[in-house]
Amino acid sequence: MFSHKQMWDAIDALAARNGLSTSGLAKRAGLDATTFNKSKRLSSAGHMRWPTTESLSRILDATRTPFHDFVLLVNGRSERPAESIPLIGFAKAGEAGLFDESGAPTGTGWEQIAFPKVNDASAFDPEGRLPEIPETNASKSGRERAVALARRENLSVRQLAQRLGGYAGLAFVGTPKTIADAMEEWLVAEGSDGFNVMFPYLPAGLDDFAEKVVPELQRRGIFRRQYEGTTLRENLGLKRPPNRFFDGEAARKAG
């Protein structure tokens, strides 16, 4: 349970962390400059006044402070909590030197299991709004489009994943036989000249296709059992172009 003093001390600490007075913090958040003044923390009758949830939300947003960081300030701490927890197998738990006198883990025989990071999707609330996503040099434009879409349409994490997590092309789902049926129909009846195959997961998806679907296609005679040529050009049926460094006679002899 948080005390009145802890909450106001945390706001003071947040302002100091950002090089601001409490008045400056309030102004940055678009609040009245006197919102967090010490005179506002008690009523004229001496009753405790608490900061509103709206004012807290606005100062966290204005300073880009995650809620769990603010909780640390409320608890009088500025450092982040441990990012891992010790874990040991049941069979080893009875060995000596693994616990101190109070029963807390000690020694070097423990594995360290990491907590999910803030940017780890497994730590997100599927029904909540998309949290702040740290910037990265990987696929910057894709990240920006996803974040913009979530904010523009007020999507939950689940809704965003459903919108972006699927593949928009033709999908074949079923047994090896039914997938081969669908591919054969496209090749024979729909005029398709081939497929660029993508898998929902790797490498098992590729293994399943190669070991189960390909033999069924080969059995029907619509997929090769071996390559006809020894080069990509030969397998694509392309003629070898003349080599400008050889005259016609030399090229014929070399061929």
Image (cartoon, rainbow, N blue to C red):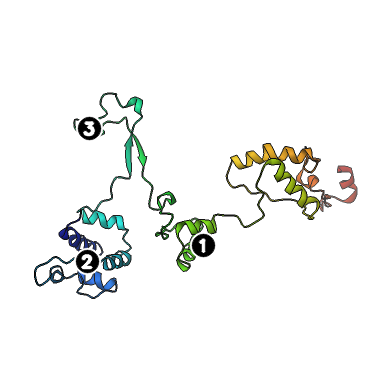
x and y percentages locating residue 178 in the rendered image:
71, 44
Identify which residue is drawn at 69% across, 51% down.
Answer: 196
Checking the image for residue 59, the label placed there is none
Q: Residues within 10 Å of mark 3 (few under 14, many from 20)?
A: few
Counting residues from the N terminus, which is met first, the one under dot 1 or under dot 2? 2
Q: Quadrant of residue 94?
A: top left
Q: Secondary structure at mark 2?
A: loop
Q: Are marks 1 and 2 in contact (CB under 8 Å)?
A: no
Mark 1: which amino acid?
Ser
Q: Residues within 10 Å of mark 1 (few under 14, many from 20)?
A: few
Q: Is residue 187 above or below residue 26?
A: above
Q: Secondary structure at mark 3?
A: loop
Which residue is tagged 3? 103
Mark 2: which amino acid?
Pro
Q: Residues within 10 Å of mark 2 (few under 14, many from 20)?
A: some
Identify which residue is drawn at 79% across, 40% down.
Answer: 220
Mark 3: which amino acid?
Gly
x and y percentages locating residue 66 in the rendered image:
32, 58
Extreme residue toward the bottom, this view: 32
Checking the image for residue 141, the label placed there is 1
Counting residues from the N terminus, which is met first, the one under dot 3 or under dot 2? 2
45 relative to 250 in the view: left or right: left
54 relative to 44 in the view: left or right: right
Which residue is tagged 2? 51
**From the viewer's perspective, is the residue at label 1 or at label 2 nearer?**
2
Q: Secondary structure at mark 1?
A: helix
Q: How much space separates mark 1 and mark 3, taking CA atoms?
A: 50 Å
Between residue 3 and residue 246, name the one nearer to us: 3
Identify which residue is drawn at 24% across, 67% down.
Answer: 52
Q: Are marks 3 and 2 in contact (CB under 8 Å)?
A: no
Q: Quadrant of residue 2?
A: bottom left
x and y percentages locating residue 5 in the rendered image:
15, 60
